[in-house]
Image (spheres, rainbow, N blue to C red):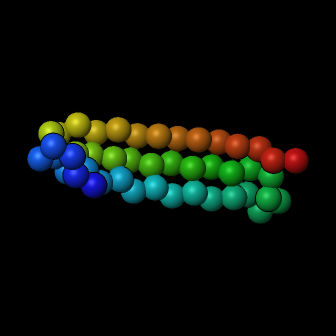
Amino acid sequence: ASYDKSSSMAVGLSSISDNGKWIIKGNINANTEKKFGIGVGVGYQW
């Protein structure tokens, strides 16, 4: 993506447990201004 002469990129993965109850997600991102970020999420479904 780009905005005001800057560009960024993000990559993420997700997985679900064998029993289908737990979901785990993670992502990383960076932009051309040398700023970085991470995100992590965990969910439980019943």
Q: Residue placed farthest to the bottom in the image?
A: 18
Closer to the camera in the image, 30 or 7: 7
Above/below status of 45 relative to 15: above
Residue 44 falls in which quadrant of the image?
top right
Residue 35 falls in which quadrant of the image?
top left
Answer left or right for 21 relative to 29.
right
Answer left or right for 25 relative to 20.
left
Above/below status of 36 relative to 25: above
x and y percentages locating residue 13 in the rendered image: 51, 58
Above/below status of 11 relative to 5: below
Residue 34 falls in which quadrant of the image?
top left
Which residue corresponds to the image point at 77% horizontal and 62% vertical from the top-left? Answer: 18
Answer left or right for 20 relative to 4.
right
Which residue corresponds to the image point at 62% horizontal and 59% vertical from the top-left? Answer: 15
x and y percentages locating residue 5 in the rendered image: 11, 47
Q: Residue placed farthest to the right in the image?
A: 46
Which residue corresponds to the image point at 40% horizontal and 40% vertical from the top-left? Answer: 38
x and y percentages locating residue 39 in the rendered image: 47, 40
Which residue corresponds to the image point at 46% horizontal and 55% vertical from the top-left? Answer: 12
Q: Quadrant of the N terminus?
A: bottom left
Answer left or right for 22 relative to 13.
right
Q: Residue placed farthest to the left in the image?
A: 5
Q: Residue placed farthest to the front in the image?
A: 4
Number of residue marks: 0
Closer to the camera in the image, 25 or 5: 5
